[in-house]
Amino acid sequence: MMVEHSTRGSRLSLFAAAYVVAWRDFMAILISRSFLFFLLGPLFPIVVASFAGGVGAQLRETVERPQLGLAMASADVAAMQKARAQLAETLGGRVPDTVVLQRLAPGETYDSGKVLAGDRGNVAAVLTGSLERPVLTGTKEQIEDWRGPVALIAASAIKGVPGPAPEVVLHSTASTTASERTGQLVTAQGAQTLLFLLTMLLAGMVLSNLVEEKGNKVIEILAAAIPMDAVFFGKLFAMLAISFVGIAVWGSAVGLFLLGSGANMAAMPAPAVGWPAMLALGVVYFAMAYLLLGSIFLALGSLATTVREVQTLSMPATMMQLVVFFLASFAMMQPGSAAEIFAIVFPFSSPYAMIARAAQQPGLGQHLLALAWQSLCVLVMVRAGSQLFRRRVMKSGPAGVRKRRFFRRRGKAQVSELSH
């Protein structure tokens, strides 16, 4: 294999050296027996994801409760709101929340379908007509669910107390803004959770690999023979490639399971950017989240000399990731707020915030800017980590000079063998 040499002649260029390190680590892990056990790792996060989905469903029911829009005569609107308030005291959450869309003048009509297709907050259905003949417009499932409560509210509004309920006329539509937002929120939360679990599961390999090679002096040989930045970049991208192999295996298994069970992808809530763009962005944002966290783990690995130190130093990083995930989840519930902007700008939460934004908001230009910012942060943190390693491990001084010369002679020979 031909490699490009730098102007220093005997040392490989940054790109070529990083490629040699990445290929060496990738093949060493791929053909190891432990890689099979690594592929079985996601069985445990699947259980965690199931619990997280249940908690998220309860949260959505609380935060994103759909509303019933009122577009009736002024007197009818007042009577419906008063009756709704009285019934809510006894029936509780069964009575839908109401919002006044328009108070109609005599003979005036209201286009419910146009409102539901537009952006009118969290309105899931619209009530028009009169108290004696209410007309309920919305998705089939929603209006069937609200048919009884609306009839009861209308009956109470007519006489002041619940009585014989009037017949509610149902007009079904394909979808509403509320149902689309709820579906996109489900997709956003699922994408965030999957991204977080994969990153936490796979990024730990970087730390364990670096500490192992520090123990057997391989990392010091590499650091003396090639630029330390190349060592860090090579290890990061090798582990990223291994992660993609694992994701491909897991994705194939899940795909076969869904195909065998007859699941329909079309029934899943579609993201705002569409499924093809969402899947592509998911891959890229996983790579960025992995590289960002991996750069921190590499820096921690440069500080640790034993497994116990690794566990002690990695705990703050793990806790930080949990805080970052909760920050991104909180920002997802408040699009356009200061919390979401902070989550997008903060490097470690940026991939999670942007994958949720892809599910909820259309447009790809914002993602190009976010990826450029995240790439810059990866570059800065890898350089900082390599400098930290160089100062702590490849120390200066007479002993350090002799140590570097010894490892440089051994490292040049080994790297030369790897590059041919």
Image (spheres, rainbow, N blue to C red):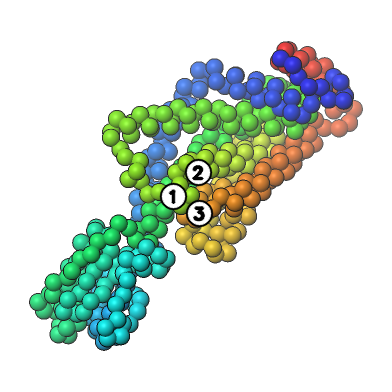
> Residue 139: where, in percent of width, then height?
27, 60
Q: Amino acid at mark 3?
A: Pro
> Residue 234: where, in percent of width, then height?
68, 28
Work out which residue is located at the far left of the displayed protein and give it.
164
Q: Quadrant of residue 46?
A: top left
Label 3 crowd bin: few (<14), some (14–19), many (20+), radius 10 Å: few
Camera-side residue of 385 and 376? 376
Is 295 on the left or on the right of 263, as rendered? right
Q: Is residue 74 above or below residue 345?
A: below
Q: Is residue 63 visible?
A: yes
Work out which residue is located at the far front of the displayed protein and give it.
107
Q: Residue at horizontal 70%, vertical 45%?
A: 376
- Give the residue at mark 3: 362
Give the distance between the C-alpha atoms of the residues marked 1 and 3, in whole angstroms.
8 Å
Camera-side residue of 337 and 370? 370
Is 323 on the left or on the right of 190, as rendered? right
- Give the residue at mark 1: 271
Q: Quadrant of residue 251?
A: top left
At mark 3, the secondary structure is loop
Q: Amino acid at mark 1?
A: Pro
Q: Residue at horizontal 81%, vertical 22%?
A: 5
Label 2 crowd bin: few (<14), some (14–19), many (20+), radius 10 Å: some
At mark 2, the secondary structure is helix
Q: Amino acid at mark 2?
A: Ala
Instruction: Confirm or deny contact between disc 2 and disc 1 (CB under 8 A).
Output: yes
Q: Residue at horizontal 38%, vertical 32%?
A: 254
Q: Is residue 380 above or below residue 169?
A: above
Q: Earlier in the sequence, mark 2 or mark 3?
A: 2
Query: Considering the image in quadrants, where does the C terminus appear?
Result: top right
- Give the residue at mark 2: 277
Label 1 crowd bin: few (<14), some (14–19), many (20+), radius 10 Å: many
